[in-house]
Amino acid sequence: MREIAFIKQNKEKWLNIEQQLTVKNKISADDWSQMYVQLTNDLSFSQTYFPKSDLTVYLNNLASTVHQKVYTNYKYEKNVLSTFFFYDVPLIAYKYRKVLYFSLILFIVFVAIGAVSAAYDERFVRLILGDAYVNKTLDNIANGDAMAVYKGGSNWGSAFGITLNNLYVGMRCYIYGVFLGLGTLYIMFQNAIMLGSFQYFFYEKGVFNESIRGIWLHGSMEIMAIVIEVCAGFILGASILFPGTYTRMQSLKIGFKNSFKLFISTMPFTIFAGLIEGYITRYAKEMPNILNYLIIISTLGLITFYYFIYPYLVHKKTLKNS
């Protein structure tokens, strides 16, 4: 479609939205959200086919203005916490879905690199995990309990310490995105390589299944939360690198606002994973296998649904109401 035809087809809609911005009549947050979705779809089309056109700048500014209306109205119309988790975050996840998938794929690639490196160099695991940890784990395997490392300390003490550490890792994944995304890439690389070499170590020692039943009780939610935090860091870095039609400062403000919400949304999952690790993982060996796998599948399914499927449902519902 040519630009003039695109304008002719949508001009009346854009003018109507402009008019709504000037009237004092009460407009619901749902109505603003419908207008915002329409504008973002038009903006996406314009950015693809007319990236240097004044039309793209116009739609960008109009969408930004309507975006503020959406969040301002939802703040007063609905429970803020409910709106945040069931509307704001899913739409942000949908908007940046390509970054989300990129983060997941890249993380998997780095995990594979860690596993392959451990397979071809027996010193690699010790280099990554440290001699003390490897030796202790070897002793645990020899004693018939590969997951004994998770049984130290009290339940609440372990859960508290683990949760703080995981929140710290997640914060670094996100905050380091300010270094043009390279800091986030580095932290992700570290953690993914560690995970890959860690899992291969257990495979090599013949206790892979035991490690899956134990580690992934909490790890399925913990690792996926890290992927989301990495995505948030990349969004922050991209807002600086690729401002588009915004000024770099405007782009950073928008990128920070969206990425910070995405980062904050991972905290309940991280805390829940810490509680599982502190209170349940220590009993992994004694638990029935079916219960182990039920917890793993349930926790992985929950966080996967929330960030990868639910955003499509929210977006679809918003489009349907428009």
Image (cartoon, rainbow, N blue to C red):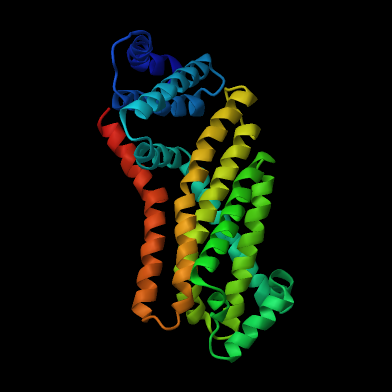
* Residue 285 on image: x %, y %: 45, 82
* Residue 15 on image: x %, y %: 36, 11
Q: Is residue 121 visible?
A: no
- The residue sitting at the left extreme is 321
Instruction: Name which residue lies at 57% across and 22% down.
Output: 245
* Residue 52 on image: x %, y %: 57, 20
Q: In which quarter of the image is residue 253?
A: top right
The residue nearer to you, when weighing 5 against 263, is: 263
Instruction: Name which residue lies at 48% across and 57% down.
Output: 271
Q: Is residue 139 above or below residue 133?
A: below
The residue nearer to you, when weighing 200 against 26, is: 26
The residue nearer to you, when weighing 309 against 137, is: 137
| 274 horizontally vs 188: left or right | left
* Figure quadrant of the N terminus: top left
* Figure quadrant of the C terminus: top left
Q: Can residue 304 be seen in this view?
A: yes
Q: In this view, does 38 lie above or below 102?
A: above
* Residue 306 on image: x %, y %: 38, 50
